[in-house]
Image (spheres, coloured by chain):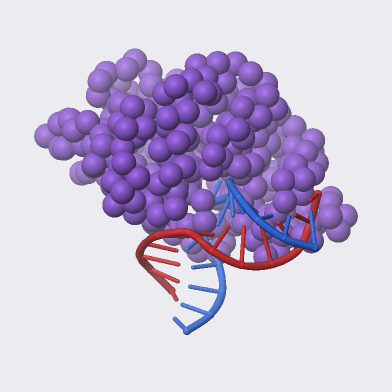
Chain colours: A purple, B blue, C red
Amino acid sequence: MQIYTENNKFFDPLKSINSGQVFLWQKYNDSWYGIDGQKVLKFTLKKQSLDRNQNNQRGKKWREIEFQSYPWKENWEKLFFRLDDDDESLKNTLSRDKIINGIYKKYEGLRVLRQNSFQCTITFLCASNTNMKRIRKMLNNLSKKFGKKISYDGIEFDLFPQVRELSNASINELISCGLGYRAKFVKSVAKDIETKTINFEDIGKKSYELAKTELLRLNGIGNKTADCILLFSFDKLNAFPIDIWIYRSLLENYSWYFDGDLNSFSTGKMTKNQYDAISNRIRNYFGEYSGYAQQYLYYHIRETARKAW
DNA sequence: ACCCAGGCCCTTG
DNA sequence: CAAGGGCATGGG
């Protein structure tokens, strides 16, 4: 058991785990538990410690958090919540843009997460052309059906399925989890990882461009899904996933920057070239922390649209 | 009934 | 190249 006190470095774990990045977190009593691959991550907020300088809105800012996990992993939170990022540099880079700067202040503490890469891959394969609620449902079903069961704090958890457990699954079993047409993609991608058609060990070491080229070879992984995987599990902070909501946000906030080049996606479709063109321009604008910019834009537009997480 | 949801693949022109 | 249709499923 630990209490987190490092340099008063502020972050907001609740926003971070409820921002469309991870879907297998649940609250029991005063603690949050999340499945990350073959681990159960746990944190507990200590209610008595509130910030003394700000207006003390109860529940807004916490000074003490306990982190635990099963199996035990020392300081897992530093990796998972990316507390190793250079927040000064991040803040300075993002604040060059007035719009992002405002949104950053509004949701400060929201972090890009560093997830288990296989779970992240399956998550965003399942996320195509559907909604948050069903993504969560699909992943829960997969874990229940194929994942190892463990007991922790007297609670039963289903770990996320391992590669082999999904590559060996039948299409019908996967469909029974509610995956629909995604079932065949999940199986074939798991197979490709198992047989090292793609080498997941090396992919994090490659550049953003090369790693993305590798991912795009796999059936079911397109531009947007690849960018999510690279940003959320392979340390590519310059990735900028563009889905329908981010596209709307760009239209709303940055049409001046694109000078009329954003008009081709109103139907919800975009060709690879169009995606690449938009991606390259916006990543050139936001720079090495483009992924954080994306996450803040995403959080903001979903909040203002009052969409559920 | 229809449209939309953190898209992608395949065929055709 | 782009344009368009199809794809499973569930909620509004």
Residue A20 is at least partly visible in this image: yes
Identify which residue is drawn at 78% across, 38% down: A280
Residue A156 image position (x, y, % from top left): 16, 37
Q: Residue at x 88, y 55 (%)?
A: A259
Q: Residue furthest left?
A: A154
x then y, percent, for residue A149 = 18, 33
Side of A227 relative to A46 (left or right)? right
Tally the marks.
0
**The image quarter in which residue A104 lies:** top right
Q: Quadrant of the rendered structure where residue A40 is?
A: top left
Residue A99 in the figure: left or right of residue A142: right
Q: Is residue A259 above or below residue A223?
A: below
* Residue A185 x, y percent position in the rendering: 46, 42
Q: Residue at x 52, y 19 (%)?
A: A199
Compare residues A227 and A21 and report the one nearer the observer.
A227
User: Where is residue A80 shown, x and y percent of the image?
Assistant: 44, 27
> Which image quarter is the C terminus of chain A in?
bottom left
Name the residue: 31% across, 37% down. Answer: A169
> Relative to A237, does residue A277 appear above or below in the rendering?
below
Q: Is residue A59 in view?
A: no
* Residue A213 in the figure: left or right of residue A131: right
Residue extending furthest right?
A259
Quadrant of the snapshot with the N terminus of chain A = top left
Q: Nearer the viewer, residue A52 or A309?
A: A309
Q: Is residue A113 above or below residue A301?
A: above
Near-viewer residue (A192 or A178): A192
User: For this rendering, which residue is in front, A296 or A262?
Assistant: A262
